[in-house]
């Protein structure tokens, strides 16, 4: 059977809701998945675990209504503390309103509990992809596939940035692909709206993809995501991590536990010695102009470290690592290397932006205004990241989002677009 379109899937959700709205208490069943119990709608069958992480457990399942396979994510302990609850709210809200072909789509959200007082579990139903980028990285890709995957990453990031959203946790395991080379970005638990001069918890981004401004506790802007994309591209070319820190990030775990206990960052604005050393060993010690942007204590430490000349990008990424140049020399190793040199810039003020990256010769062969310039999502909660609530208050907000989704699907309001389904499909 030909796979249904995304809007076909959403239409089926609406029809199913209308048919079953009075049978809620009969719609669920439970089964054990690893160490967790999934209680899901009966329409979802043949659950199989496919991944797990700090944010939750993911299963594949067959949706009997949509007649297709889907992914179901059970959020991990969403109401354990304020941090977990805020991340759950952020992920749900952003997934509801962000709508782009290179960002994972939300097909359904539900809870088996029937009231706010009982509310404990949140399940997100998403499109099911074939693999994550961790698996693709080990493959030998030609320039066309390498460039096209990167183009799609940048289109998704551009869509987020246009709405003032910074992903903050881009890494191969948060990027999924299909066998036809379609790529989508997922996992918005750490995403946040952008503002000038914001400080990011230094252990928020996965260590190997952490930008220098994060490592050094500086303010950050949207192109913090571009550094992560540069690290991912480098890993796809080299088939190994570009800046490998210690294998076990005990420091980060300790800091996170301390923050959970204290309710505040343990060491705000401090650097991570090991990861910073890995960066400057490869790219060289930055200029004095950059060092003057650091706060005094961090600058003192950095200035007292050994100075490194670093390696040229020709040395870091020699031609032998790249595939042969494409037909008619449209895509070349030299172009990919030039793009890497513009993404992996320690000083964020000199790093390429997502718009500039999309115009780069290695990328713009795929340029499609409909994909690059899609209307940005309208996030209704403008204070999404400034909000501070108790766990119970977050719980109430999340419960409202879940029940609102049922009203959306019942009334034909799709992914934040208040229009009849027929109009949305046109």
Image (cartoon, helix red, strand yellow):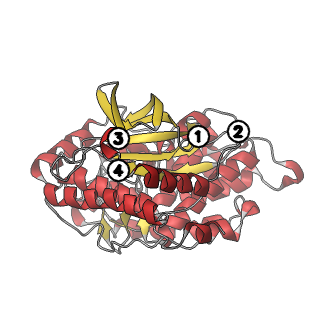
User: In the current view of this chain or complex, which residue is farthest to the right?
Assistant: 328
User: In the current view of this chain or complex, which residue is farthest to the left?
Assistant: 262
Q: Nearer the viewer, mark 3 or mark 4?
A: 4
**Where does label 4 land, which residue?**
22
Classify residue 181 as left or right of residue 402: right
Distance between the alpha carbons at the discs numbered 4 and 2: 31 Å
Distance between the alpha carbons at the discs numbered 4 and 1: 22 Å
Distance between the alpha carbons at the discs numbered 1 and 3: 21 Å
Residue 249 position in % (x across, y down)? 31, 37
Of pointers 4 and 2, the one earlier in the residue sequence = 2
Query: In the image, what residue occupies the spot 60% across and 44% down?
Result: 316
Distance between the alpha carbons at the discs numbered 3 and 4: 24 Å
Distance between the alpha carbons at the discs numbered 3 and 2: 28 Å
Local packing at callout 2 (Cα closer than 10 Å; few below 14, some 14-19, many 20+) is few
**Where does label 3 land, which residue?**
74
Classify residue 349 as left or right of residue 199: right
Front residue (pair 172, 124):
124
Residue 129 position in % (x across, y down)? 57, 41
Front residue (pair 388, 356):
388
Of pointers 4 and 1, the one earlier in the residue sequence = 4
Q: Secondary structure at mark 2?
A: loop
Q: Are marks 1 and 3 in contact (CB under 8 Å)?
A: no
| Residue 278 shows in the view | yes
Local packing at callout 4 (Cα closer than 10 Å; few below 14, some 14-19, many 20+) is few
Q: Nearer the viewer, mark 3 or mark 2?
A: 2
Of pointers 1 and 3, the one earlier in the residue sequence = 1
Q: Secondary structure at mark 4?
A: loop
| Residue 280 shows in the view | no
Q: Are marks 4 and 2 in contact (CB under 8 Å)?
A: no
Classify residue 329 as left or right of residue 157: right
């Amino acid at each position: 059977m030909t796979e249904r379109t995304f809007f076909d899937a959403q239409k089926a959700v609406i029809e199913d809701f209308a048919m079953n709205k009075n049978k809620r208490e009969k719609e669920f069943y439970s089964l054990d998945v690893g160490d967790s119990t999934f209680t899901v709608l009966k329409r979802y069958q043949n659950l199989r675990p496919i991944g797990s992480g700090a944010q939750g457990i993911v299963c594949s399942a067959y949706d009997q209504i949509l007649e297709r396979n889907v992914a179901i994510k059970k959020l991990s302990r969403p109401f354990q503390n304020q941090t977990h609850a805020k991340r759950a709210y952020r992920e749900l809200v952003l997934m509801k309103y962000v709508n782009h072909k290179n960002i994972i789509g939300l097909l359904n959200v539900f809870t088996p509990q029937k009231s706010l007082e009982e509310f404990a579990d949140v399940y997100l139903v998403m499109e099911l992809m074939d693999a994550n980028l961790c698996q693709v990285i080990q493959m030998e890709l030609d320039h066309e596939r390498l460039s096209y995957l990167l183009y799609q990453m940048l289109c998704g990031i551009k869509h987020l940035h246009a709405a003032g959203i910074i992903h903050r946790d881009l890494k191969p395991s948060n990027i999924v692909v299909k066998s036809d080379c379609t790529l989508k970005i997922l996992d918005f638990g750490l995403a946040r709206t952008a503002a000038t001069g914001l400080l990011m918890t230094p252990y928020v981004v996965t260590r190997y993809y952490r930008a220098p401004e994060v490592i050094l506790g500086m303010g950050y802007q949207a192109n913090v995501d571009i550094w992560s994309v540069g690290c991912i591209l480098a890993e796809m070319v080299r088939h190994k991590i570009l800046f490998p820190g210690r294998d076990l990030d005990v420091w980060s775990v300790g800091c996170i536990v301390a923050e959970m206990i204290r309710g505040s960052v343990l060491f705000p604005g401090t650097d991570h010695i090991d990861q910073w050393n890995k960066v400057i060993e490869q790219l060289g010690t930055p200029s004095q102009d950059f060092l003057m942007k650091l706060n005094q204590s961090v600058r003192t430490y950095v200035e007292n470290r050994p100075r490194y000349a670093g390696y040229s990008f020709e040395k870091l990424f020699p031609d032998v690592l790249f595939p042969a140049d494409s037909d008619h020399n449209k895509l070349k190793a030299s172009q990919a290397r030039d793009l890497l040199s513009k993404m992996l810039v320690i000083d964020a003020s000199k790093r390429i932006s997502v718009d500039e990256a999309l115009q780069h010769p290695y990328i713009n062969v795929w340029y499609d205004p409909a994909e690059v310039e899609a209307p940005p999502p309208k996030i209704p909660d403008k204070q999404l990241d400034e909000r501070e609530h108790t766990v119970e208050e977050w719980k109430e907000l999340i419960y409202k989002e879940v029940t609102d989704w049922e009203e959306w699907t019942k009334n034909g309001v799709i992914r934040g677009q208040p229009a009849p389904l027929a109009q949305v499909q046109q």
